[in-house]
Image (cartoon, grey):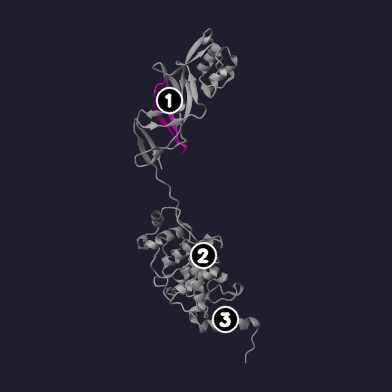
Amino acid sequence: MFNLSRGQSRTAALMTLSFTIGAIAPFVNASPSLAQTTFSDVPSNYWAAQFIQQLSQRGVIAGFPDGRFRPEEAVTRAQFAAMINNAFQKSSQRQAINFVDVPSNFWASNAIRQSYTIGFLSGYPGNRFEPNQNIPRQQVLVSLANGLNYSPTANTQTTLQAFSDSFNIADWARSPIAAAAERRIVVNYPNVQFLNPTATATRAQVAAFIYQALVSSNQASAISSPYIVALQPTTPTPVSVTIPQGTAIPVKYDQAEKILVTKDETAPLTLTVDQNVVTQEGRVVIPAGSQVIGKLQPAQGGSQFVAEKLLLTTGEEYQINASSEVITKTETIRKGTSTSTIIRNTVLGAGAAAAVSAVTGDRAIATEEVLGGAAIGSLIGLFFGRNSVDLITIAPDTDLQMTINQNLLVSVK
């Protein structure tokens, strides 16, 4: 009675199948190139129109024979399993199980089995799947996060503060939903701040979630939507902390094992903080690697390091009042002493270098680099004719450990 072309016959057969098994109708698709992508009940300005169109084009989800999509209709766990299998191609992660409430001839039995083995969906106690149960929004998000092996990278509680109704999220769902939010999988309409975790997921909402999951795994191009939850990067608020007088600052000096200066000279010196300085609460106030800039100067018959500036690893600078103990240990340099022995692993102040050069007669010492890069030629005359000289000898890693002499206020994040 009717003569149909091959394409018309195929379309008629699909529509007949849709009417015959209504539960599966929205998920039976022609090939993606023939898939319906516009629907009479999804206008172009509908909030989820782009998500629905893209998934329909991919063959993940389809409309009904009457040309509608029914975006506000609830999604069952069986229907969601079918969507998952259309959207994601993954290898099995675990052994399949036979759910007692999913007979082998159930329309979605294969989809349920597959969605379980690839890690997206699980069952309930008693080996039940509840295929006809409407699926809540939080369960959809947990499924996508778990199936894609996403874990939160930030503090879960802090992340979930993006949702005004986060208190309604079940304990078992909190961590996966935080991971989903970090990956921009969560789409909330009409208020982006309300998750409505226990509400039944609609076909439009599931389409948005699945599409965003594809975007997060680099399987689809991003869609611009004001309803995608985009977490704002949190900038820690700086806190002012007082480092009390008497606090020790452990330092090191990498340039040499020993420093020699005369008891009368002043020499610039920069030290490195060797260990974190922390508060009783464990907050780092001076990070290891920060620099203490100051100078060695005469003090009570010896030499003492006096700090002038603290340069943190963050780039912040502070004026600092701190000093080491006075160092009075001496080393006697005598005429005829080998200068190579004196200067091995040693840095000299300009005065000490001049003294060594004058006493030993080794003018080559004048070419050695000294603290501060000072010229020492003009200082040699001060020691000319001496047979020996006593120099202050400093072991930087032990002798220059210092304490703060006045409370220091720093800003930390």
The answer to whether the residues at label 3 and label 2 have Cβ atoms under 8 Å apart is no
Q: Nearer the viewer, mark 1 or mark 3?
A: 1
Q: Residues within 10 Å of mark 2 (few under 14, many from 20)?
A: few
Q: Which residues make up the magenta segment?
A: 309-327
CA distance for labels 3 and 2: 33 Å
Badge 1 crowding class, 10 Å Cα cut-off, few under 14, some 14 to 19, many 20 or more, is some
Query: Does residue 42 appear in the picture of this structure?
Result: no
The percent position of residue 316, horizontal first and vertical second, equals: 45, 36
Q: Is residue 316 magenta?
A: yes
Residue type (three-letter) at the residue carrying disc 1: Asp
Q: Which residue is mark 2?
A: 93
Q: Earlier in the sequence, mark 1 or mark 3?
A: 3
Q: Determine whether 404 is above or below 225 in the image.
A: above
Q: Secondary structure at mark 2?
A: loop
Depicted 106 relative to depicted 311: above or below: below
At a point 52% along the width and 23% down the height, the residue shown is: 346
The residue positioned 53% from the left and 15% from the top of the image is: 356
Occupied quadrant, residue 380? top right
Q: Which residue is mark 1?
A: 399
- The disc at residue 358 is none
Residue pointed to by mark 3: 14
Q: Amino acid at mark 2?
A: Gln
Residue at (56, 60) in percent of width and height: 218
Q: Amino acid at mark 3?
A: Leu
